[in-house]
């Protein structure tokens, strides 16, 4: 193919991309019809075919969203164009020659309310350049547009389940299955990978009947089993519609409101309406993801799953002095929102002992952030490895221990993403030779896993399965395999059911 005439046929029509720095790049490719007007809050509809050649030289708009409050040093608010017409994907490929390249599909994070597949924080060229894979990144509906369950509160007038964003992700994966061979990718060797809400989305996908056969491998970075009950989703919808000041049976009015109004109302409500995320509706998502996976829903998928050692310290920086200086009573009250009281005191004491044993500070702040991070991220990822191993399917685990260059952040949430995409900054990650070496090794491991289902690579050496011995790769300046790392903390959760995690 000529570098200045980058045209590829898709099921819906021809698209024209660009050739830059050794890669063929296609941006803003629609994988579903615009979810606007009568299609707002409905499952994604098929793309309408086009005649001629459609430009795929620029990113499409991202899902409407507010600026995300974040203390991450060096990160600027997104300035990408926003529009409800946002169901686009992007492709980076080294070439079209064989249709046998491993495919990696990135599902972005952002608390289910923020982010995009075109964010400059996650440059799509890194992994294809380094490892010859085809990379796809996607947008999906966020917040009130993607996770608002309206079926019950509108008496079925708007039949949204609260899982429309997950259905967007499935539609994107079906597009990949049907089209990626034309971009040099193997549709039968697809790895989904994501961080935070992206990883939690993948946990849901692993439990969803509709995902069968769409991917063979999954990498879950910090998250694996986020979901909420129908009752909780309905309660959030009632609060939200009441705040809009609109009758819950005025479907036309709800559909006609601007996206800006919808998002502003949610921003004003804050956590009063609860958070967004996958809904256990019994059909699209049958149950708590880990419970469904235990029954074999992901038996055909190989997983690589892990978390950062001090995930919750990022959120502590957002919440500020009240958390940093909390006392014992405040710690307990905050933890009651995460863990049922019947388990809580025992859990606190076990973490107090674990931190003491490791000669770490044993303050209410340290105990709170350790428990919060493990409850939300580390334990779901570990349970996923355990489940797959029990079912005879390979599971590979890791814990990311690199410390942020920013004081008090530690090995916090989201720090790992810059390493995977080779996008380190001095303030947050540190740009030492050791940091760049770790980034390269992590990229090689992710690429090896995508190609073969095994993350072993020259930089890390043999990466064993999680197995009965609970072997995990510790990712740090001196990465190594460790048997049962941080076992006291892990064992503290043994009697706590999957429903409490995430």
Image: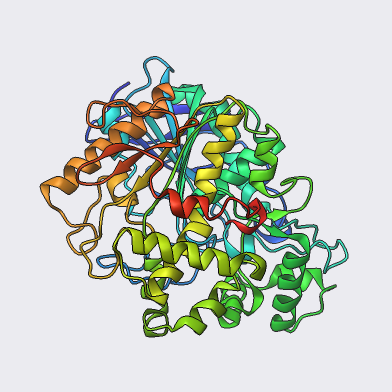
Give the camera-side residue of 304 and 443.
304
| Residue 375 location (% of width, % of height) | 53, 59
Residue drawn at (65%, 38%) of the image: 293
Indicate the quadrant where residue 40 lies: bottom right
Q: Position of residue 401 (x, y in %)?
A: 30, 51
Color scheme of the displayed model: rainbow
* Vertical order, 48 against 228 (above or below): above
Which residue shows up at 41% across the image and 21% down it?
A: 452
Please state, as top left, top right, bottom left or bottom right, where the C terminus lies in the image: bottom right
Q: Is residue 39 left or right of residue 334?
A: right
Confirm whether residue 35 shows in the render. yes
Viewer can see residue 53: no
Question: Residue extending furthest right?
Answer: 155
Residue 246 position within the rendered picture, expressed as x and y whole percent measured from the top left: 77, 80
For residue 492, side relative to residue 78 (left or right): right
The number of discs equals 0
In-image side of 191 versus 95 (left or right): right
Query: Would you place residue 390 above or below residue 366 in this image?
Result: above
Pick the residue in front: 369 or 10: 369
- Residue in the picture at 56% in, 28% down: 177
- Residue 203: horizontal and vertical position, in percent? 58, 45
Q: Residue furthest top?
A: 98
Q: Is residue 451 above or below residue 469?
A: above
Image quadrant in which the N terminus is located: top left
- Where is residue 361, by image quadrant? bottom left
Residue at figure coordinates x 26%, y 68% from the top left: 73
């Amino acid at each position: 193919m000529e570098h200045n005439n980058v045209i590829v046929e898709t099921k819906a029509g021809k698209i024209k991309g660009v050739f830059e720095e050794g890669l063929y790049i296609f941006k803003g490719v629609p994988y579903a019809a615009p979810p606007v007007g009568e299609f707002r809050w409905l499952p994604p509809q098929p793309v309408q075919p086009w005649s001629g050649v459609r430009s795929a030289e620029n990113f499409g708009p991202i899902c409407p969203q507010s600026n995300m409050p974040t203390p991450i040093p060096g990160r600027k608010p997104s300035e990408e164009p926003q529009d409800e017409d946002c169901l686009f994907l992007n492709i980076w490929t080294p070439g079209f020659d064989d249709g046998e390249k491993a495919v990696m599909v990135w599902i972005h994070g952002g608390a289910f309310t923020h982010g995009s597949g075109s964010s400059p924080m996650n440059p799509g060229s890194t992994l294809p350049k380094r490892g010859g894979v085809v990379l796809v990144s996607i947008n999906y509906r966020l917040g009130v547009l993607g996770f608002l369950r309206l079926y019950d509160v509108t008496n079925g007038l708007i039949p949204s389940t609260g899982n429309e964003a997950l259905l967007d992700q499935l539609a994107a994966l079906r597009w990949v299955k049907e089209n990626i061979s034309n971009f040099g990718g193997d549709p039968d060797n697809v790895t989904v990978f994501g961080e935070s809400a992206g990883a939690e989305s993948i946990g849901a996908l692993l439990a969803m009947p509709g995902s069968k056969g769409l991917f063979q491998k999954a990498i879950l970075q910090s998250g694996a089993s986020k979901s909420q009950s129908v009752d909780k989703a309905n309660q959030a919808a009632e609060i939200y519609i009441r705040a809009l000041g609109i009758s819950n049976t005025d479907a036309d009015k709800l559909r006609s409101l601007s996206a800006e109004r919808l998002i502003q109302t949610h921003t004003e409500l804050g956590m009063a309406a609860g958070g967004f995320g996958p809904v256990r509706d019994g059909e699209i998502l049958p149950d708590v993801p880990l419970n469904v996976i235990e029954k074999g829903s992901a038996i055909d998928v190989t997983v690589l799953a892990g978390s950062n050692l001090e995930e919750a310290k990022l959120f502590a920086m957002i919440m500020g002095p009240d958390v940093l200086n909390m006392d014992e009573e405040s710690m307990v009250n905050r933890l009651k929102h995460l863990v049922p009281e019947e388990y809580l005191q025992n859990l606190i004491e076990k973490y107090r002992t674990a931190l003491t044993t490791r000669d770490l500070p044993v303050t209410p702040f340290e105990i709170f952030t350790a428990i919060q991070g493990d409850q939300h991220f580390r334990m779901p990822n570990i349970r996923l490895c355990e489940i797959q191993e029990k079912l005879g399917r390979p599971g590979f685990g890791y814990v990311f221990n690199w410390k942020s260059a920013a004081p008090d952040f530690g090995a916090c949430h989201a720090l790992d993403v810059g390493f995977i995409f080779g996008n380190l900054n001095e303030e947050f990650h540190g740009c030492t030779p050791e940091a760049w070496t770790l980034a390269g090794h992590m990229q090689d491991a992710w690429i090896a896993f995508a190609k073969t289902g095994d993350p072993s690579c020259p930089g890390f050496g043999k990466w064993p399965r999680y197995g009965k011995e609970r072997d995990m790769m510790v990712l740090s300046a001196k990465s190594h395999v460790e048997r049962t790392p941080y076992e006291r903390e892990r064992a503290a959760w043994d009697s706590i059911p999957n429903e409490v995690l995430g």
